[in-house]
Image: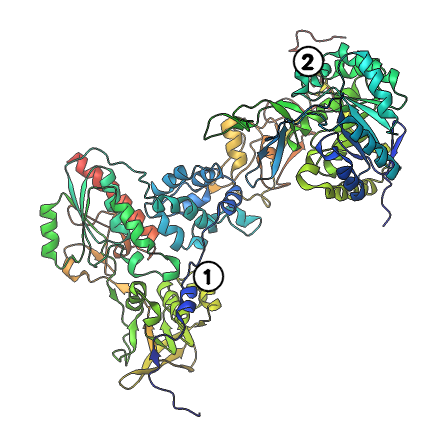
Amino acid sequence: MATQKPSPDIRSSRLGKSEIDRNFSDLHPPLSRPEALIEADRCYFCYDAPCITACPTGIDIPGFIQKIRSDNIQGSAHTILSENIMGGMCARVCPTEVLCEEACVRNLHEDKPVEIGLLQRYATDPIFEQNNQLFERAASTGKKVAVVGGGPAGLSCAHRLAVLGHDVVVFNRDSKPGGLNEYGIAAYKTINDFAQTEVDYILSIGGIELRNNSPLASAAELSDLCEEYDAVFLGVGLALSNSLGIEGEDMTGVLNAIEYIADLRQAEDKSKLPVGRNVVVIGGGMTAIDVAVQSKRLGAEQVHLVYRRGPEQMSASVFEQTLARTSGVAIHHWASPERIIGGDHVTGVEFRVESSDDRLHLEADIVFKAIGQNMNGDGLISIALESGRFVVDENQKTSMDKVWAGGDCVVGGDDLTVSAVQHGKIAAIDIDRHLRKA
Amino acid sequence: MIMADLKTEFLGISSPNPFWLASAPPTDKAYNVNRAFEAGWGGAIWKTLGEDPHIVNVSGPRYSTLFSNDRRVIGFNNIELITDRPLQTNLDELRQIKKDWPDRALVASIMLPMDEASWAKYVPMIEDTGVDGFELNFGCPHGMSERGMGAAVGQVPEYIQMATEWAKQAASVPVIVKLTPNIADILPPAKAAQDGGADAVSLINTINSIMRVDYDSLTMYPTTDGMGTHGGYCGEAVKPIALNMVAEIARSDATRALPISGIGGITNWRDAVDFFALGARNVQVCTAAMVYGFKIIDDLVDGLSTFLDQKQMTLDQLVGKAVPSVTDWQHLNLNYIEKAVIDQDLCIKCGRCHIACEDTAHQAITNMVDGERRFEVIDEECVGCNLCVSVCPVDGCISMQQLTTGTDPRTGEPITDEKLQWTGHPNNPMRKTG
């Protein structure tokens, strides 16, 4: 080699600003009106439509599409948002190919579902752009509910409670609301600060007080909330990243993907973000894909995504896996990390290849861990847990009196915004039922 | 590849194919007709000529449209009147076109007041240009009808007969009478044309219509300076109405000998086959050309030729082929039984057949079988109405199949080969016995 490679090779501005801007533009540009009308025309308006069943929030999809066809955009948005107040974000981030669009009957005879996600965005975008308030609060009940967590579950719960006439205080850990909508999710899926636009819309219903930088720190605080409020909803997410539990994990350059994604989302100028020349991502979920693709789009030369099992077991959808490949990410299956190699700083990772004595050695300036998160449940131990998550019933009620929970922090949480929204909605309806009985 | 010859004789007027442009804006002047003939159209009926001085048209919206969701034109509404150019200009151009295109059919459409002198004056003048025939416009339902012409004539059989007689007296070339659909029964006008000596009828002209309102101003749409008027409706949407009227004339004892030129929503060769099979000997096209341009003649000619080749038929053999299958309701066989059958391999499980049947028909299609989403016909309830076939989005998925043996599970009655018409049905108090 003619020149000595600097080690580690981590720097910003690997690509010019304009190229980065292009790489982080809208992944799925919105439909124009003619496109939307033609696409809406493809909906068969099925009876007992399979897409509705496949939507975790049960949106009346044929209903909202029919309203698009008749230019009743406000009515269409109301149909969507009354089941899913984050219908705008879900239109952008839902893995529709494994939810509503997978269930579309058009798959059965032409293998091309109706573009439900894009139509949902078409119907909801104007509502947020115009801040068109579609909901009205019921008469005040005089009840107060504490919602812990400013992510999709918490905000969904808060909105529904506010609509039902309750007053809500949202205790948000971070300096901005939105949870993973604000700090997670690949940037090209939610451009133009949409997460905050959506939160503003949700809060504009009234009756919701947002307190940022207010983490729930202890069981004692939870008890205090139960004293002070008529009900408590926990949508605290999974704050801690899982560890690999292997040699070298503490080296510099070994990062939690979720933190890097948060930095990326908050960066004013993405070209200023430090990017490794060689990046290795360990994991097989959406976070792994998001960090791998975004690293590539920031200018990393080699990005390897390594997953310990096969493509079918990856929780990232086929669409996401394809997106990674077409973005230039190399995906390796059936390889588990054995040790991180390096001195002060990581230089590579060694993987054991499944069912063989082979080793896969990948050079790395940065290693991202994207093997899931867990909840720091220790402080809230008074609630029954299973595998480190809250146990809830079908109404999102925990074992603790006056406490409901939803989103990623409950058993059955599946890392999807849409599921978290549904949890929050169900909990709000149940809380309302309880408070009216009381 | 040898294609079926579409050369046609209609009333002794020959044309290389049976597709003529109807009298309308596409045949307004020589420029358009030249382009049409270059594109391959078999003939043209010139935009309707009237008296001098010529009428005037509005200089605002003349058309409005019924769209499908992707803005495909389903129907047109128009308020344009007859030619608004000097008669002499039209005569000069007719003469030139006939000279330049001797193998194409060129027919003059005319609309004149209800006095014999007008017909005696104008008909010979127009015939002198060399046109192959006349078409009497007794059809336009807007504007001219307010002046006692167009549909105002076509709605009164006595007027039709009278004006036809005047035209026949003045003309030596064939006379076609163009009928309006804005009547209760097409047979009296057709019979009147025949009695007046018409060589043929052409139908249908346009249907009285208002397209819609303007959702902002809540006025009718479109308007001319804030006011609107009804127009004539045409295009694909009117085809079924036209087909019925054509078939009625073709199967009626009184009018079956009258040659028919079919008009109404013909957009592709299949539409033309409908008209031919139901009794038309040639067809006229307007709206489709106005939407897509003259080039559609390629598919019309090519599609019809290919179809005839596949059927091993001539165009003459196709004409009227389906007429014997058209009858009155009272002659339908009430012992004939069909049931819908859903091909489960083709079914995409949209459930439209179920909800249509469940909400609006006979509750004869399941939505769940053994806890699975599955759509099956319940023979005990199915009356064979064809609604499910009509709403199914998958071609060929639901078919109607005749029951030939056993009993009808719905009625418990045995299936019989014996025909039973309403005329002889026991429930008919007027039944014919013996």
Left or right of B162 in this view: A82 = left
- Residue named by callout 2: B425
* Nearest the eye: A305 or A9: A9
Q: Secondary structure at mark 1?
A: helix
Q: Residues within 10 Å of mark 1 (few under 14, many from 20)?
A: some
Do dots 2 and 1 share one subunit? no
Q: Residue A318 shows which numbered tag? A: 1
**Quarter where residue A282 is shown:** bottom left
* In the image, residue B82 above or below residue B34: above
Q: Nearer the viewer, residue B5 or B103?
A: B103
Q: Quadrant of the C terminus of chain B?
A: top right
Disc 2 residue type (three-letter): His
Residue A394 in view here = no
Q: Residue at x 83, y 32 (%)?
A: B92
- The part of the image, by quadrant, that contains residue A277 is bottom left
Q: Nearer the viewer, residue A177 or A330?
A: A177
| Residue at the bottom extreme of this rendering | A2
- State the separation of the CA atoms marked 2 and 1: 64 Å
Where is residue B72 shown, x and y percent of the image? 60, 39
At a point 55% along the width and 49% down the height, the residue shown is A108
Amino acid type of the residue that numbered disc 1 sits on in the rendered structure: Val
Instruction: In this rendered view, identify the residue nearer to me: A77 or A286.
Output: A77
**Does residue B165 appear in this view?**
yes
